[in-house]
Amino acid sequence: MTLIQLFWLTFLLTFCTSCNGQEQRTRQVEIPPRDVTTMQSRASQSMTQDQKGNIWFCDSIGVTVFNPSTNKFKHYTEKDGLSHNNVNSILEDNKGVIWLATANGITTYEDEIFSVITIPTIIGNMNYIKTSSNLYAHIENFINCILQDSKGNFWFGNQKGIYKFDGKDYSHFTENDGVQNNTGYAISDGQIFGPESIIEDKSGKIWFGGRGTDGLFCYDGKTLNHYNVDSIEWVRPLMQSSNGDVWFNARRKPMLYTYDGKSFKSFTSIELKDWVFTMLEDNDKNLWFNNGKNDGVTFYDGKKFINYTTEIGVLHNASNFFCTGILKDKEGNIWFKSLSTELCKYDGKTFTFYQE
């Protein structure tokens, strides 16, 4: 054996040994938080309370249901019938059916049975291959968000843009609904993300935006409009408050915007330390914001901000509480979800933690 051959043999043995060792170590440790954040920052936000009072939320793997009356958690994964373990959005429709937007199409849950709807099924193409463990394989089936509007229509955002379901037929919005996109801007870049959030305001307008969309879009039932807010590519609709303002978050800034029907205004504070991915208004018209990595939650009553952290002794371990989802239940309690399966309920006086 020559020296050159010996060199390459030694190199290959070292490389393979290193790779095998790294693979073995990876199996033995938990996924680092930053990796979970990369995959699940959008998925972790979605929470809903069903008609039975159960709290549904996206888990790091699959979906979890918490029963407040028994304090018990129940997990669902692909083994139980989910089309994919990466769940991005949860909705209960007006008939009590649970809809789950996943990385591999749509999964519905009714009468304790899961059913799967895929984008190829929607567009009539039956040449379908199940999404592999690669998160971005067959990206056309990756559903980011889901909405049922006041007329009963369903809206789904994915890498190909927006799909709509009127209760009978699925259609590719703008292409099959006779809606002309004359804005000059693409709803989706056709790559990875596409629209990540869809909301309906009180006037019936549908707002959508997110990574992969060029700005912010609004559909009033006839016309598709585009808004270029501060020249920011990613503007994502969050909610509409009781005063009529529609709230949006902005890309790579701890900044929010409001729209009062006439103009956009920026809204920010030093108390908001990170991107606001989810927010809500409580029964007293106070606003609650998730406050990014390890910074708990922020309360705003219209005058003052309170960042609930361990420093002021209110929210236990909030310095390690990466709040990703916020929900107001039917009784007016506020629920906060961490990046793990930990839940926290605020009843107006006390913060109570629940963890399996």
Image (cartoon, rainbow, N blue to C red):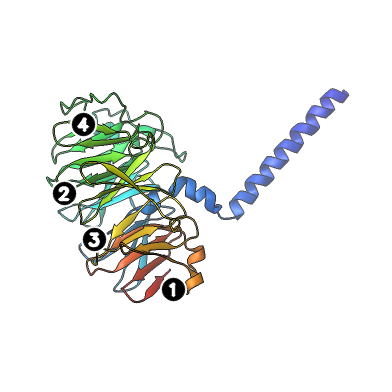
Instruction: Tell me residue 348's x, y (percent).
Output: 31, 73
Q: Tell me the residue that label 3 is attached to.
A: 50
Q: Tell me the residue that label 1 is attached to.
A: 314
* N-terminal label among 2 and 3: 3
Q: Tell me the residue that label 2 is attached to.
A: 202
Residue 323 lies, with reference to residue 209, above or below; the image says below
* Three-letter amino acid code at the position of disc 3: Asp
Quadrant in the picture for the N terminus: top right
- Answer whether residue 221 is visible to the viewer in this image: yes
Q: Say which element carries label 1.
A: loop
Q: CA distance from mark 2 to mark 1?
A: 35 Å
* Three-letter amino acid code at the position of disc 1: Val
Instruction: Tell me residue 335's x, y (percent).
Output: 34, 65
Circle 3 Cα neighbour tier, 10 Å, few/some/many (<14 / 14–19 / ≥20): some
Q: CA distance from mark 4 to mark 3?
A: 32 Å
Q: CA distance from mark 3 to mark 1?
A: 29 Å
Circle 2 Cα neighbour tier, 10 Å, few/some/many (<14 / 14–19 / ≥20): few
> Can you tell which of label 2 and label 3 is closer to the viewer?
2
* N-terminal label among 4 and 1: 4
**Residue in the foreground of this view, choosing between 206 and 159:** 206
Q: Tell me the residue that label 4 is attached to.
A: 224
Instruction: Tell me residue 2's x, y (percent).
Output: 87, 23
